[in-house]
Image: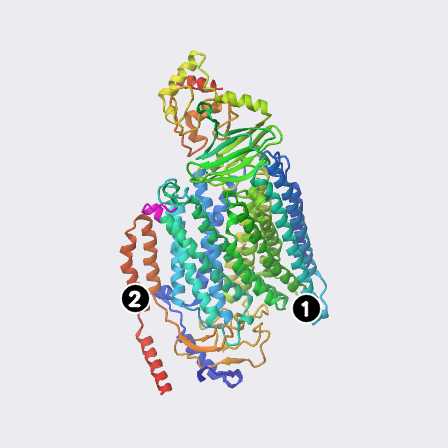
Amino acid sequence: MMRAPGSALRASACVASAGMLLVSCTGNQAGLNPHGPIARSIATHSWALLAACVVVYLVVMIALFVAIGRRRRDSDDRPETTVRLTRNVSIAVALTVIILLGIAASSVIAGRGIYSPSGAGAITVDVVGHQWWWDFQYHDITPSDVFTSPNELHIPVGVPVVLKAMSTDVIHSFWVPNLMGKRDLIPGMITNTWIQADEPGVYRGQCAEFCGHQHAHMALNVVAEPMDKFQVWIRHQREPAPQPATDQERRGRDVFMQSPCVTCHAIRGTDAGSHVGPELTHVASRLTLAAGTLPNARGHLAGWIANSQSIKPGNRMPPNALAPADFQALLAYIRSLR
Amino acid sequence: MSDAMVVERRATITTADEERLRRQLSDTWYVPRGIIGWFSVADHKTIGRRYIITAFGFFIFAGVLAAMMRLQLAVPNNHFIGPDLYNQIFTVHGTMMMFLFAVPVMEAMGIYLVPLMVGTRNIAFPRLNAYSYYVYLFGGVMLVITMLMNTAPDVGWFSYVPLAGPDYTPGKRADFWAQLITFTEVAALAVSVELVTTILKTRAPGMSLNRMPLFVWAMLVTAFMVIFAMPAIVASSSFLLLDRLVGTHFYNPAEGGDSLLWQHLFWFFGHPEVYIIFVPALGMVSSIVSALTSRPIFGYSAMVLSLVATGFIGFGLWVHHMFATGLPALGLEYFTAASIVIAIPTGIQIFCWIASLWRGRPRFQTPLLFVLGFFAIFVLGGLSGVTLASVPFDLQAHDTYYVVAHFHYVLLGGAVFPLIGGIYFWFPKFTGRMMEDALGKWNFWLLFVGFNVTFFPMHILGLEGMPRRVYTYPDNMGWNTLNLVASAGALLLVFGGALFVYNVVRSYRWGVIASENPWGAETLEWSVSSPPPVYNFLHVPVVEGRCALWDRSADPPIVAGIRSDCREVLVTDVMDAEPVHKAAYPEPSLWPFACAVVTSAFFVGSIFTPWALPVSIIPLAMTLIGWFWPRKKESQRHDERVHAMQEARA
């Protein structure tokens, strides 16, 4: 009878500590796998916190086993026992206070580096949340050099990038765990935060504030590149869309301009200028489609255009019924927008 | 103190006197029968029992929804449930668990137990109590109907604007949510006022504040928290309804409104809400630990001060739900500090219970097993709560499965485990029969193992970046195994829940007949038969020490001079429970039910048209007039009393 509760508690303690250690350090969307200064500062602090919690948990559980499993004595009801217990409880409370003060201090120190960038920001990017995709707007003094990069944030490695967070509809939360913690995008508010990657790579992020139907499919990629490659990318993105090279692509462009596509999407260098949906000027150069939902491949693109509702139900893009030849031409044109 | 309330020795009363008194009290405090009687009952035990059963009904409904979510999330890219239904399910699961199960069931335990524990004949404002039950019931039924009709709220139990506003959730789904909140506010505020009054004004003589049972202290703190927290949600949900119904712009930034205003108001209520659920459970833990170790709880004063401190500090933490909104850093650090500070009173209580177990003579029956399970789960949940108080950590863990794991450890481990232990513990008092202990142990192990298998992996999922409130997730994220494990654990939880229901039904029919005090516990509810008579106490008791029954002398004093031919109760003063005067409680009445029907029609109607307000005012006033209209018997008695007082003065 005595053994039963004891073993339960012991088992749960083992599970708890083992579980904490099992946390993967390789995830491409895991804060404990940091690739930038903010995430690193948080991860170090987090390990310390989790370790402190495991130790405190084990100590409390051991105290509980001893309390329920020990042999009862006649002296238990004497006043001296109460005095001793009072002293022990007081010590435990004092230790609790000290540990909590340590946690508070560690938290404040780890927080210092989060709020303001470690150096001057290399560039500033607007992060705009939409139901259910991201728009990254790269500003420039020359108006023709302003461009947007939907669902894909490119940053140079090793320098802070300032982000201006905002939303056009509901509240979203921008979160790239390997690089930084969350920042909510709140309509009617613009807040500044920053991001930095120490190594080149592609880091996945995902909306962290419930934003409606397709909150689950609102992901993004941060592509961190060395400065020279980043400059090449930015120069390319500033270019208008490439002209269609083949007859099929030209026909595809005409299909685009005469179909409902043009009412929502912009392609710079053409007459399509609507910014309801993501800009498509260089859509073929991106890694994914539909905010990280699909790999950017021809088959997926075809499925998406034909009936995106079967892939991401509730999203704002209507199904498109096109004649097969028109459909193939449209695909060829969009695939040419590199 | 008038001489009608002298305290006398029980030995001077003969058995024949007692029998006569018993008959008369049964007649006076009768519970009406028949269908009309059923709707007129104002006895706290009957209403309390209905409240508990109803709350568990909602618990099962919301639990089934949770099982469906785990089914959907068992494998990646699952098509079992689509986003529209999934969003309704998680919204109704959260809303129902918080507003229709956790808070009401805790208040229900208070409704049943507090009048017995403080030694009075009924809860204060018994008709209001009946009214609150029907309002709660109708609100809950409304939410169930919306779920069954596939028009349930789908914006989360927190209903953040602008998503819940008129532009992004057209239709009536979010209005059903906002009005459900109104239903539960009204019910919870009514019960809290009753509990505060019962506890502060009708304690048995001798039960000064420093002798009050810890469960009663916990309910007092909870009731005050409800009274101070609910106005914030009253305001915020009314603003939301106005934005949606008549086009105000409280939350519309384009017209000068503010979407963060909602979050401040909601969490100013929402964080205390967690303590409103959890503090009564602490009271249950104390009751069970002292009874099943046969010793008083160690450190009574520290325990009481911790409960009260929790009640105050609980109001200073709400911004830790908003660390990612971009508020100023210095302000955030204040809320980190406040959130960490609340671990101190909780820690003190844990240490005092461990000291109690150390000093006592523990008997490992089912209620104590649930309490030990509470320690194993809740301590972990409390520690993960401390980690979430840290801004940097929270910025990564916020809105991930780590938080889901944390609050299930705190709410299921911290509140539901003690509650189920409490049901095993008080079941003999509720029904007169013991619950089957061997089944109870199976029940405990199934729930304990099932709980940990379901929710422990979620900590890791959260740290690996899985966000909350997603209806599905991609295949290649490394989340597959742990999600499958969690879903398997949910199956164990379903079996555990089913076994609990089976044990309740079986024990209710065939359980061993319970004595007055089967656990040898210390508080006054164990001094009366199981189940208690309608009038609770034959003689209003006089309390002689902190442990009412253990400190009772051989021939305990009682209160005499309380009328038994009408519903008269003794009123005592707040601090020392000295008798001050007597109050008349109302007879059973159908009017509170009628008033609840009209109130509910008004609440539901105002989802669809603002005209519901002017139209329902007249019937509402009529039912209230009926409610307060004195009956002939009552007015006669009032005249008699005034007459007697005038004579006495003359």
Residue A47 in percent (x, y) is at: 65, 43
Along the viewing direction, whichever of A237 and B101 lies nearer the viewer? A237
Mark 2, secondary structure of its residue: helix
Residue A82 is labelled as 1
Classify 10 Å Cα crowding around label 2: few (below 14), some (14-19), many (20 and above). few
Q: Distance between the residues labelled 1 and 2?
A: 58 Å
- On screen, residue B204 above or below A283: below
- The percent position of residue B447, horizontal first and vertical second, equals 57, 52
The reply to whether the magenta stretch includes residue B17 is no
Quarter-of-image position of residue A87: bottom right
Q: What residue type is labelled 2?
A: Ile
Instruction: Name the residue at 51% across, 63% down.
Output: B221
Up-down relation of residue B463 to residue A88 (above or below): above
A139 with respect to B298 (left or right): left
The answer to whether A298 appears left or right of B288 in the picture is left
Q: Is mark 1 on a helix, strand or loop?
A: helix
Q: Are marks 1 and 2 on the same chain?
A: no
Disc number for residue A133:
none
* B245 drawn magenta: yes
Discs 1, 2 touching: Cβ within 8 Å: no
Residue depicted at x 46% and y 72%: B202
Residue under circle 2? Answer: B625
Please state which of residues B401 and B491 is positioned toward the viewer in this rendering: B401
Any part of residue B501 in sight:
no
Could you tell me which chain the residue with mark 2 belongs to? Answer: B
Location of residue B19 in the rendering, given as x and y in whole percent from the top left corner: 46, 80
* Quarter containing the C terminus of chain B: bottom left
Please identify the quarter of the rendering in which residue B88 is found.
Answer: top left
Crowdedness near tag 1: few (<14), some (14–19) or many (≥20) residues, C-alpha within 10 Å: some
**Residue bounds of the magenta highlight:** B242-250
Q: Is the residue A60 above or below the residue A23 in the image?
A: below
| Protein chain holding label 1 | A
